[in-house]
Amino acid sequence: MVIEGYKFAAAPLVLGIVALIFGWHVLAVQIAAVILLGLAIFILYFFRDPQRRIPDENGVVVSPADGRVLEVVDEQHDGRPGRRISIFLAIWNVHVNRSPVTGQISRIDYRPGKFHMAMKGAASAENEQNIIYLDTTAGQIVVKQIAGMIARRVVLWKQTGQTVARGERIGIVRFGSRVDLWLPLEAKIAVKPGDNVAGGSSIVARWG
């Protein structure tokens, strides 16, 4: 469980319990209590953080997020040719993001922006996002945490200069969102649109 989950769930949980204790004989209060407790349970479910089996095979790139692959497209980044894998996180997916490779965070750019629906292609370029540059022995890759129409907060737990391991937790995007992974052109993509992936455990490419 992500610690933020306890913080967000505390208020509806306490209010729901209080409502049940002191208003159990009033139907309207009972309904309100059930709604509050249901909200608390949903929040705790949303912030779940299950353990994952991280592949130890050399040269693999794992998914940075749980969800469904929206698209795999050729795309330049900072003038370099490559491919972008976009993953859509539905509200029921685990929202903890993980590092796709072992490397050092050389740069983090926060970019304010719009809140298009995360499934739209424009979200990759125009929505609020954290852009994380990871330097590895084989080269540089880029991960984007992208806010959506409902998810309006991207949270990164790491800082520039830190080294992260493949599959290590790096942040979270709240309540439905999108994560993009940019890889150099020589990477061999192992997923296609429509594939379901699990953060930290699903292999999305082979590279290096």
Image (cartoon, rainbow, N blue to C red):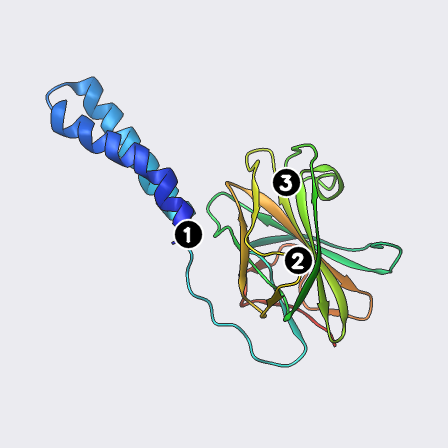
Mark in front: 3 vs 1: 1
Other residues around mark 2 within 10 Å, as few (<14) / some (14–19) / many (≥20): some
Q: What residue does disc 3 label? A: 118
Which amino acid is tagged 1? Answer: Val
Mark nearer the N terminus (3 vs 2): 3
In the displayed structure image, the side of residue 33 where residue 49 appears, left or right: right
Query: Quick one: quadrant of the C terminus?
Result: bottom right
Mark nearer the N terminus (3 vs 1): 1
In the image, residue 9 lies at what x, y percent?
34, 39
Q: Can residue 180 be seen in this view?
A: yes
Q: What residue does disc 1 label? A: 2
Which amino acid is tagged 3? Answer: Ala
Other residues around mark 1 within 10 Å, as few (<14) / some (14–19) / many (≥20): some
Q: Which residue corresponds to the image point at 64% horizontal and 69% vertical from the top-left? A: 101
Which amino acid is tagged 2? Answer: Thr
**Of helix, strand and loop, which one carries label 1?**
loop
Spatial CA span between label 3 and label 1? 22 Å
Compared with 194, 146 (above or below) is: above
> Which numbered dot is residue 195?
none
Mark nearer the N terminus (1 vs 2): 1
In the displayed structure image, the side of residue 89 where residue 40 appears, left or right: left
Q: Which residue corresponds to the image point at 65% horizontal and 41% vertical from the top-left? A: 119
Q: Can residue 66 be seen in this view?
A: no
In the image, residue 156 lies at what x, y percent?
57, 50
> Which numbered dot is residue 160?
2
Compared with 56, 132 (above or below) is: above
Query: Quick one: quadrant of the N terminus?
Result: bottom left
